[in-house]
Amino acid sequence: MLRICVIDGQGGGIGSAIIRRIKDLFAAQVEIIALGTNAVATAQMLKAGANRGASGENAIIRSVGTCDVVTGPLGIVMAHALMGEVTPVMAEAISGCAAKKVLLPLSQDNVEVVGVHKAPLPHLVDELIESGLKTLLN
């Protein structure tokens, strides 16, 4: 069974969209761990169908080392992203863990990723599934 950590902050909307889509397609093949930078984000991701969830810096630091895949918005690997909710220690733990990272190219205020097309969140989540997760599950 593939263990996927979905990380999000603020209201947890991005993580929830990812979780719902993964559950629709691969429910029996995956264990989804919702890791929120705050309790609201975690609660929303649990409502979306995550198997387990935890909130805060230490939970994220400890959990990313136990998963096969980490997913969420690009900001989760950047210190001070998501309006300051991603601490430098969180960003280092996420970017440095051995898990495959499949990130959505959602922009931060002062970061532009060149060569990436702009698309609505549902389309980006579909691409995340097709290019990042399907190959790991087949």
Image: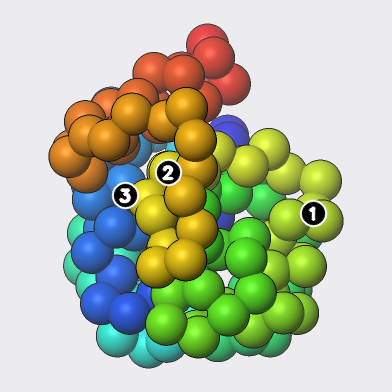
Q: Is residue 50 above or below residue 138?
A: below
Q: Is residue 79 above or below residue 67?
A: below
| Circles 1 and 2 in contact, beta carbons < 8 Å | no
Q: Position of residue 5 (x, y in %)?
A: 54, 55
Q: Which residue carries the number 2 mark?
A: 104
> Residue at the location (27% across, 35% down)?
118
From the viewer's perspective, is the residue at label 1 or at label 3 nearer? Answer: 1
Question: SS class of the residue under badge 1?
Answer: loop
Q: CA distance from mark 1 to mark 3?
A: 21 Å
Instruction: Bin the neighbour count of mark 1 within 10 Å (Cα to Cα): few under 14, some 14-19, many 20 and up.
Output: some
Q: Position of residue 85 (x, y in %)?
A: 49, 84
| Circles 3 and 2 in contact, beta carbons < 8 Å | no
Q: Kindly tell me whether residue 24 is visible in this rendering.
A: no
From the viewer's perspective, is the residue at label 1 or at label 2 nearer? Answer: 2
Q: Which residue carries the number 1 mark?
A: 97
Q: CA distance from mark 1 to mark 2?
A: 18 Å
Q: Which mark is residue 19?
A: 3
> Residue at the location (47% across, 50% down)?
112
